[in-house]
Image (cartoon, rainbow, N blue to C red):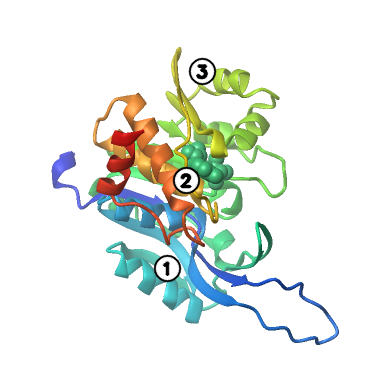
Amino acid sequence: MTSHESRQWDVLVVGDLNADLILAGEVTPQFGQVEKLIDDATLTIGGSAGIFACGAARLGLRVGFVGKVGADGFGRWMIEALSERGIDTSGIVMDPAIKTGLTVILSRGNDRALLTYSGSIAALRFDDIDLRLLPQTRHLHLGSYFLLDALRPDVPALFEAAHAQGVTVSLDTNYDPLEQWNGGLSAALDHVDVFLPNETELCAIAGLTDVESALAALSTQTPLVVVKRGAAGAMARQGDRIICAGSVPVNAIDSTGAGDSFDAGFVSGYLAGWPLERTLRLACACGALSTRAAGGTGAQPTLAEAEAVLSDW
Ligand SMILES: Nc1ncnc2c1ncn2[C@@H]1O[C@H](COP(=O)(O)OP(=O)(O)O)[C@@H](O)[C@H]1O
Ligand SMILES: [Mg+2]
């Protein structure tokens, strides 16, 4: 087996990659062909896995990405934007038969309305993933389990193949748009080292209403369960050990992707072998700092920026 130090990447990220188009202004769209002017328009990297990959790269990790885009302008732009951040995009498949996913975010004051075309996200298949990449990474992170329709049945096999190569595995399911919260998830969780849901997702998956009981239930299956609680911070449970971290005070502008930036911070501390408490605090700092600008990737911190927050907090 390849030693960890000689591996090409720290993290191989598998999952959703789509463009986010943020349209900001004090306007309400109106049918009947009414044209209105807005204040700002920004095209940013979207998708939980895409935002995670950028956060991990910003923290200094060596990152590879596996996903699918269409052979179109948004797809080419996504690949270019990840490459500019030093992410290896050779595992991204461009499929001329499908279109890249897009979310249009209408942002007005503190409120937002989202319109999503999921496009290529659901089309990523197990056969699209070159398993020879696994011995080249130390860790594998999968984002947006419930959106990956074609890959989902094979996620347990992917995780098993990763473990067979000495690769650790983290999973952030994100929300299930069908609200069924199953789709074979239990079989996938059998092969997860770090599970990273938010509190709504954790409770729905466990079928329980309080976070502590849901954390206790899931931690019988997964060695490390970390639950994100928005502005209230996060909790982690490893066996019988429970650790809480409060959030970092920040002037939050947009929480898009805060959970994904949190995950990147957590995986960074985990791979560096940091104690759990410090790893959880680093993750909270990365989540909080990412909310300082619109979009998921605009304000993700470097490790030095996040560590500066940890030392004064
Ligand atoms: N308004 C906020 N103020 C401070 N920290 C925040 C805020 N929103 C999110 N965070 C940080 O980011 C983490 C992840 O955000 P959260 O919204 O819980 O995740 P998700 O995006 O997965 O739902 C939180 O645990 C917290 O540490
Ligand atoms: Mg999330």
Location of the C terminus by quadrant is: top left
Residue type (three-letter) at the residue carrying disc 1 = Val
Using the image, determine if residue 31 lies above or below residue 281: below
Residue 116, how many percent across, how many down?
65, 65
Find disc 3 in the rendering and name its residue: 220
Residue 259, how many percent across, how many down?
50, 45
> Left of 106 or right of it: where is 10?
left
Q: CA distance from mark 3 to mark 2?
A: 34 Å
Earlier-in-chain disc, 3 versus 2: 3
Front label number (1 vs 3): 3
Is ligand 1 closer than 8 angstroms to the Cβ of mark 2?
A: yes
Residue 87, how many percent across, how many down?
30, 61
Find disc 1 in the rendering and name its residue: 93
* Residue at 43 percent of width and 71 percent of height: 78
- Comparing 241 with 157, the one in front is 241
Earlier-in-chain disc, 1 versus 3: 1
Q: Secondary structure at mark 2?
A: loop
Residue type (three-letter) at the residue carrying disc 3 = Thr
* Residue at 51 percent of width and 18 percent of height: 220
Question: Can you tell which quarter of the image residue 157 is in?
Answer: top left
Q: Which mark is residue 250?
A: 2
Label 2 Cα neighbours within 10 Å, binned few <14 / some 14-19 / many ≥20: few
Q: Is residue 304 visible?
A: yes
Using the image, determine if residue 23 lies above or below residue 138: below
* Residue at 45 percent of width and 45 percent of height: 287
Residue furthest to the right in view is 32
Residue type (three-letter) at the residue carrying disc 2 = Val
Q: Secondary structure at mark 1?
A: strand
Q: Is residue 162 visible?
A: no
* Residue at 47 percent of width and 30 percent of height: 246
Q: CA distance from mark 1 to mark 3?
A: 36 Å
